[in-house]
Every structure is written in C-alpha cells, then in structure tokens.
Amino acid sequence: MSAKKLRGNLLLLLTATIWGTAFVAQSLGMSYIGPFTFNAIRSIVGGIVLIPCIFLFDKLTGRHPAEDPAVRRKAQKTLWTGGIACGIVLGIASSIQQLGISYTTAGKAGFITALYIVLVPILGLLFRRHVSWSVWVGVALAVGGLYLLCINEEFQIGTGDLYVLICAVSFAIHILIVEHFSPKVDGVRMSCIQFFVAGILSAIPMFLFETPSIPDITAGILPILYAGVLSSGVAYTLQIIGQKDVSATTAALIMSLESVIAVLSSWLILKEAFTVRELIGCVLMFAATILAQLPDKRTPQVPSKVS
C-alpha cells in the first residue's frame, strides 16, 4: 500500500470515528438544551468552520471564478440552488435525528441512521437505476436487523427508533440531492451553505417549541462544539482530503464503521448496554451496509455521507 493510500485510509477512519462518537455528543447535548436548539447551533457552527476551509481549498487547488459573467452567474445559481435544497433536507433529517436521540440510545441511533446506505440505491429505482442482487440481500438483512433492534415483544417500535428511521430516509434523499449537484459545484461551498440553511431552518422550531437560554447553551457547549466543529467542519474536510487517494468502494466501507464506532463509544462513555437480541440486530444491519456498498458495474457507487 502506498503512503498516500495509507494516509487516505487513516483520514477516512478518523472521519468515521468522529461521526460515530458524535452520536454520544448529540446524546449528551440533550441534557442541557432541546433538540432543535442543539441542531440549530451545531449547524451554524459547522457553517462557520467551513468558511476558512473554502479559502484553504481555493489556495491549495488554485481555484478561480470563471471570467465570463454569464458562466459565473449560472454557476452561482446552481451552487445556491444545491446548497439550499441540501440544507432544507439536512435540516429536517438532522432535527428528526436529534429528536429521536432524545428517546433512544446513541448506539441504536447510529445503526438505524446507517440504514441510509441501503436506502440510497433503493430510492434510485425512482430514477430507473439498476439495483444489484447484493443490495436486495442487504435490504433483507436490514429489515431483519431493524426488527431485532427496534421491535419489542408487543410488536411495537419505540418512538425514538421511529424518528431515527424517518431520519435515515431523509438522509438517503439528501445524498441523492448531493449526488445531483456535487459534480456541478464546489463541494465545500455547497456544504457551507447547507449548514447555514439547516441552522436557520432548525431555529424556527427552536423559538416556537423551546426556550433556549445562554446558561443552558454554555453548560452544553462541549458536545455542541464537538458536533459542530468536529463532526460537521473537520470531518467533512478530512473526508474530502482522504477520498482523493482512496477508491469510492474502500472509502464507503471504511466510513460505514461509523455505526460500529457509535455503539462502542456509547458503551464506553454513556455505559449503554445492548441485549443479545439487539446485538444480533446490529450485526445484521452492519452486514447490510457492507453488502449495499459492494461494487456493481451497472450501478454507480453509493455516495458517502456529507453532513
């Protein structure tokens, strides 16, 4: 393995670690502030962190705006359209996820959220995309894993688990929107816009349903900053750098470890315990995410998370 590829793999592993442990930060944040307040501040912090990253990438890549005013205006319109569209869906998905974490464990939330990896190719059927056999097997495993992980003896799904399941569907839609716009615009700029849009969108229910206060926000500043600075700004930047020297399949497989890290970190830090039934469910869902990412010549690679 070359030094560049090794560095890329390590950066992507660090990205998965940050995203996985962010579920712990999101859970801890609920001890101080409401879910909409947490998500609003986290998203805006993430957008602020990406601003210097834009200038850094411009300097490293030598990027300059198009000289033709018409071309520049068209590019700006596409950028803002993509950023706003992604931000709206991301704001909805993140808020639902944060609300779900209020009712379920961080570890379970991490695994259920990872279902978006399986859902992306399934939703791709709406655009007449081919779905490989491995994805269909992954769907079957994911359904079995969800049953063991979420459905109780009374055949009922927990409120928090249902919220996070809806969040996974929203994240899958978000990834399809990103896939559409990302080849046409600068990814860091679009992500910066989407975080600000998601933050503003989350601020509306924050003021309607919650009573945010400076003392409460200050008390929960560490998990807020972890989710905003590291999970949003730093991890996204590491993903971009790491994927330059690693194949899409390898990158997706490494970053799918996010769900496993979420369980391990919630067990170590929050002392969350899983039953044998739930652990089997986790194993089935992890197998489903791996199968969904196996390369298929007729199907484009499932894009990785960019939120």
Image (cartoon, rainbow, N blue to C red):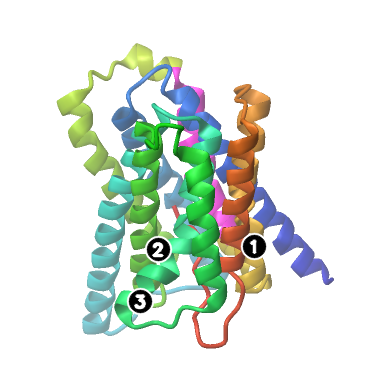
Disc nearest the viewer among 3 and 1: 3
Which residue does the image show at 62% across and 62% down from the upper left? 290
Judging by the rendered image, the residue that carries numbered circle 2 is 175
Q: Which residues are magenta?
A: 220-239
Tell me which corner region of the image, top left, top right, bottom left or bottom right, holds residue 163.
top left
Residue 231 magenta-drawn? Answer: yes
Residue reaching furthest to the bottom: 298
The picture places residue 49, in percent across and down from the top left corner, at 45, 45
Judging by the rendered image, the residue that carries numbered circle 3 is 125
Crowding at mark 1 (Cα within 10 Å: few <14, some 14-19, many 20+):
some
The picture places residue 90, in percent across and down from the top left corner, at 33, 51
Tell me which corner region of the image, top left, top right, bottom left or bottom right, holds residue 4.
bottom right
Is disc 3 placed on a helix, strand or loop?
A: helix
Real-space Cα distance between discs 1 and 2?
A: 16 Å
Judging by the rendered image, the residue that carries numbered circle 1 is 253
Real-space Cα distance between discs 3 and 2?
A: 14 Å
Identify residue type, mark 2: Ile
